[in-house]
Image (cartoon, rainbow, N blue to C red):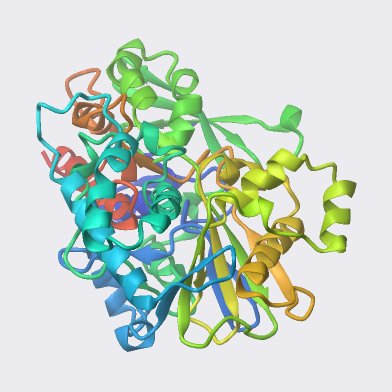
Amino acid sequence: MESVKVVIVGGGAAGLAAAKTLSPDVNYLLIEAQDYIGGRIRTVDAAPDAVVDLGAQFIHGKTNNRVYEICKQLDCIMALSSVNNEETIAIRSDRTRLNPEIVDTVQTVWEEFAKEAQSKFGDVTIPTDNSFYDYLIENFKPLFLSALPSCEHLLDEFIDYFDKAELVENGCSSLATLSLAEYGSYEYLEGLMEYELKNGGYRPFISYLKSFIPDDNRIRLNSEVVRVKYLNDTHQLQVETRNHNIKSEHEQEISTILCDHIVWTSSLGYLKENFSSIFADEIELIEQKQDAINRLGFDTINKTVLIYEKRFWPDGVGKIMLLDRQKQKSIEFSDSLKTLIKIEHIDERVVSTIIEAVHRYDELRSTNVPILICWFGGSAALLIEDINENIIGQICHEVLCHYLNLSSKSNKLNRVLKSEWHKNRFIRGSYSYYSIKSSAKAGEQLRTAYEPDGIPRILFAGEATHENGYSTVHGALESGIREGNRLLSILNE
């Protein structure tokens, strides 16, 4: 029977950080269920000379951010001069483009509003079931009208836009499930909220972390941990894995590994679906964590990547905001798209939900290839996973062309990519947040080690376990370092 000192479950940023921290001196094995290293960092070649991150895409903040420090060292962060001059435009469905001063003012108002919401963190007078949506509906209007008294006719459209934008920002399916009391628990590091990466995305970062693993024998891909049991007599953990290299499930053999410790780094979404079955023999562990796993939020955000032969949106524009609460009433699709939708038997209500969810296009500025990224949150993020990417891409394309008053036929798509993070059964979503059912206590319960004999045997890492950097790559990285150091202190005793 195979035996190692430590098993690291998950090959994302947290698992790789734990491996780097432990160093080659510790006999560890990193087990990854998928066929690649990186987890929710998934970098793909979109076109010649164009690379796209289908998962994590930005670095959030600079000061005390280890991800920023590593990427700076690797010279893979875009220069600020390359991105700062790009303009954000807002267009209504009647194709009128808002005055840039109005757009800038609204964004400033939103930042002020968000800071007020963050300041509620730690206020014990706020009921735990108060949602961010409740606060938005009650408090954004007076701030908006105070700054823009002549723009009340735009209020509902901007509330609708920020509602959708915050779904993407927080990874929740509805702002009605996002906790107001915990909204400020996330720590915004000094610097820009989003640093963009050069062409290559997060690929150099993952390669850097992987370089600290001395040989490929320390990594086992396509291998899912299906059962973990603590053995009282030997004080070891019995880890059963299933190899997914074999396509037929009936032929997939169960392998057993013995170890002294596990660093568990899988997504919260995977834990929600599999925790009770994997640890079925560990009743005490289930009692310790199951409630926290159930209460913490973890939903799906997806993106559609539109790759063009030539640029057709306005020069100098890096972000396009779409305003209107009922887009589908004003947009007429091309006959070819209507035919595709009909052939695929896609329900009109599904198409309407997807159209309504389209609210923002970001230009990928790391390449000269014309690429736009369209973001989806809420129910639409799930719906697009089951529809052909070319149909989704054409919907996004024709919605944009309608707003820009341009021919969709004259500006053709070359290729479309889309993420499918919920369909991925080893991830089941995008990133974590504090729901109205959860609190800081749930986060603490999630990251607490399991000590069946008084010694930490199963340690938990991953972005969802980070106290104030949840949902981010730096949160995942720091959690892996945290648990790696905790384990080293145990091993060195």
Q: Considering depth in this image, is 142 or 117 the residue closer to the camera?
A: 142
Q: Residue at x 45, y 61 (%)?
A: 215
The image quarter containing residue 436 is top left
**Left or right: where 471 falls relative to 379:** left
Percent of width and height locating residue 89: 45, 74
Percent of width and height locating residue 400: 62, 68
Q: Considering depth in this image, is 289 or 242 the residue closer to the camera?
A: 289
> How many numbered marks, from 0 up?
0
**Left or right: where 299 falls relative to 103:** right
Q: Residue at x 75, y 27 (%)?
A: 250
Residue 166 appears in view: yes
**Left or right: where 166 falls relative to 314:** left
**Quadrant where the C terminus is found in the figure:** top left
Q: Residue at x 28, y 51 (%)?
A: 475
Percent of width and height locating residue 9: 42, 40
Compared to residue 148, the image places residue 269 above or below, namely above
Percent of width and height locating residue 170: 37, 47
Q: Considering depth in this image, is 387 or 448 the residue closer to the camera?
A: 387
Q: Residue at x 42, y 46 (%)?
A: 167
Q: Considering depth in this image, is 298 or 66 the residue closer to the camera?
A: 298
Among all residues in the image, which is located at the extreme front? 150
Residue 5 appears in view: no
